[in-house]
Image: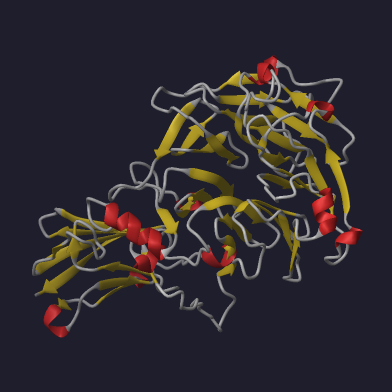
Amino acid sequence: QQNADGEGAYLDQAVLTRAPIWQRYEANGSPPSEVQALDLASDGTLWIGTRLGGVGRLGTDGTWCAFNSNDPVVRANMTDADGHVRALVVGTDGRVWFHALPNTGDARAIDILAPGAGCDHSHDDWAHIPHGDHRFDGRYWRTARDADGNLFFLSDGDAGLEPDHGGIDVASSDLGRFVSIAPDTLGGSAVGALAFDSESAPWTQAYVGLNGLTNHGLKRWDRAGQLFPPSVPGPFNFSELALPSTISVSEYRDIVVLPGTKTLWIGTDSGVFEYDALNRRVVTNLRAKVDGHAGLISGDVKDLQLDRFGNLWIATVKGLNRIRLDQRQPAPVELVIETFTTIETIRERNAASTVGQLYDPRRALAPLPAPKVNGLSYDAARDRLWLATEGGTAVIDVAGLSQHVQTALDQVVLYPNPVRLDAGHREVRLAKLSEPATVTIYTIEGEEVCTVTDREDGDIVWTLGAPSCLESEGNFHAASGAYLVRITTSAGSTMRTLVVIQ
């Protein structure tokens, strides 16, 4: 890190026996600016949009190319020469579309870049959609791409440009067809999120989150074959999905649809909630973690992403959360929410807690360039999750992080037993557990001592404390005696006896 005199170094870990789970690309290896958006081309090429550095491309050969005002050719073609990029999306033909979020009342074109070979900007090909052409007159802060390659630009609804400014503007990837879906059609001008019922086939329904409408902003879009002229969407294509008064959304940030279902996960500026669109009801509502119950590292959610392993990834301003939906236990068992963030954030959240330690660095620490994660993009062909952070870009080997351990209950190892503090024992470990696993410690009278699901190096650990099973400020130390250990995994449930000797 760095001391007061500016001296110091970065410490990285090299795992020589296998490919690393995490990789980072910070300012010395990528465009040096906050990464605000990112998207992947079909061949695995990564594109990033930055706050002050234009756009960057990470090729499949591992080399970066920057498209910013440092090159006169780029500066002459980029609408915002200062490199402010907020919305970015890659078309099916490999061209990248991006847009600056201008100041209130200002207008900006959408830039379309077809990069030349290598990083020779004289071979780049540029096109633009000027402000007002095809009724594209919005301030675009988010984008989406459907399975047909159509590109959707979501406006923030600023009324400083046009009287009917806002809504969703759509272009086909070949720049041949356009449609502008106005606020009076949608029922709102500021569009925070858009998701389709299928990412791999033409969609029939989509879900739209409209900002500033409290609990009336979630809409279902029935396509009915209508998208581009002459059959354009009308108000009858959009119907409100009822939300209870307890769900009041200022800003929608993202929506994902569980494949083959009507179940939505919806990210907002105050958390995430699970929504059953068939029965129109909220199933789960998650906010920032404040105690021992399930919660997010921050309620300020920036993006959501599903992968093929059943993981729901949640990007927040304080780090990354993961929910393994494929290993979800029936209610009333709480969701297991994993956290990946920086040591500074772990210390900050623990220091602000009034109930002891919220996060154990051994379980939550991750090599993020910065805790604020602005966007996510999943490379399904290579099982890699890309993260846009305030300090650079990171990528996770999702397959490596999602390996399942399958072990019969009679193979679970509990050690040491008995636990002797005079012999230097300070914790109990349970090894060879299938995933997911929940361990609950009880006194011999049946009173619950603590429950733990987190793992350290594959083991579940009890550090002989309560009410948290892990090391925590304010924990009480276990007394001598016999304890019952309930072990619940995907293989079933069993009870073991443990003896603690002070």
Q: Is residue 482 above or below residue 273?
A: below
Of residues 20 and 438, the one drawn nearer to the viewer in this rendering: 20
Of residues 65 and 308, the one drawn nearer to the viewer in this rendering: 65
Q: From this viewpoint, is residue 168 visible?
A: yes
Q: Is residue 293 above or below residue 118?
A: above
Q: Is residue 449 left or right of residue 413?
A: left
Q: Is residue 48 above or below residue 396?
A: above
Image location (x, y in percent) of residue 355:
22, 52
Query: Which colour scheme appears in the figure?
Result: secondary structure
**Which residue is drawn at the image coordinates 44% and 60% (left, top)?**
341
Image location (x, y in percent) of residue 404:
50, 64
Q: From this viewpoint, is residue 492 visible?
A: no
Image location (x, y in percent) of residue 283:
43, 34
Image location (x, y in percent) of residue 325:
49, 49
**Which residue is drawn at the image coordinates 36% and 66% (left, top)?**
361
Q: Is residue 135 left or right of residue 440?
A: right
Q: Quadrant of residue 217?
A: top right
* Image quadrant containing the N terminus: bottom left
* Image quadrant containing the C terminus: bottom left
**Which residue is drawn at the image coordinates 57% and 64% (left, top)?**
396
Q: Quadrant of residue 157?
A: top right
Q: Is residue 495 above or below residue 311?
A: below
Q: Quadrant of residue 485?
A: bottom left
Numbered label tally:
0
Of residues 353 and 67, the one drawn nearer to the viewer in this rendering: 67
Of residues 180 and 420, the one drawn nearer to the viewer in this rendering: 180
